[in-house]
Amino acid sequence: MMPVHDWLRRLLWLYAHGEGCYPLMMGLRATEWDALQAQFDPPTQPMPADCLLRQKLMSELNATRSDEQQQLAQWLAGYMAPGAAPMHNIIASVSLAFNHLWQDLGLSSRQELRELMSDCFPLLVEMNSENMRWKKFFYRQRCLHSAGELICRSPSCDACCERAFCFAPS
């Protein structure tokens, strides 16, 4: 078990080194970003131009889906471990990217993501008893319990041709 503080430090390091697929400021509001920066000593070397461009593009994409991102962040906050903020906003922002969540966060494996989720969102790990891929799990849960505010991205997992991939063992 890793303390939330260490997870935040790890994700900030990955972001600062251009790993993963983060929007600018990890998708955080300026006050959250400033607080995160003040809490840790971020690397001082400049970010490579291609990484900065990718982050700007992700920010532009996220801006077109800001309602979806905010709804997901709010939902995640309801399952977050005490003291884990702003992890819910980081996860929600990165969830709008295109690969598996562990890849978009820049983590080394799906298992490492499960460890992060266990430490920061333990109730969601319990709920994800079939070990569904995290992004699909988020949207599936949101669709099952929503009042119609967002479009379900995985409406029928049992009928989906990728079911075996989503529920594959770690």
Image: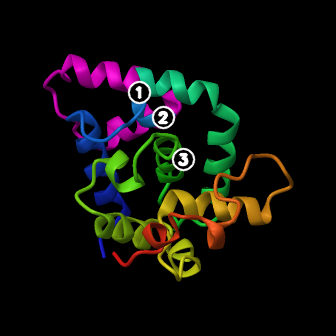
- Residue type pointed to by label 3: Ala
Q: Quadrant of the N terminus?
A: bottom left
Q: Which residue is mark 1?
A: 24
Q: Which mark is residue 92?
A: 3
Bounds of the magenta segment: 29-56
Q: Which mark is residue 32?
A: none
- What percent of the width, then of the height, locates residue 74? 67, 51
Q: Nearer the viewer, residue 104 or 166?
A: 166
- Labels 2 and 3 touching (C-beta < 8 A): yes
Looking at the image, residue 14 lies above or below residue 124: above
Q: Which residue is mark 2?
A: 27
Looking at the image, residue 111 lies above or below residue 126: above
- Labels 2 and 1 touching (C-beta < 8 A): yes
Considering the numbered disc 1 on the image, is that residue within a helix, a strand or a loop?
helix
Q: Quadrant of the C terminus?
A: bottom left
- Residue type pointed to by label 1: Leu
Q: Residue at x 41, y 53 (%)?
A: 101
Q: Residue at x 47, y 67 (%)?
A: 166
Q: Residue at x 50, y 47 (%)?
A: 95
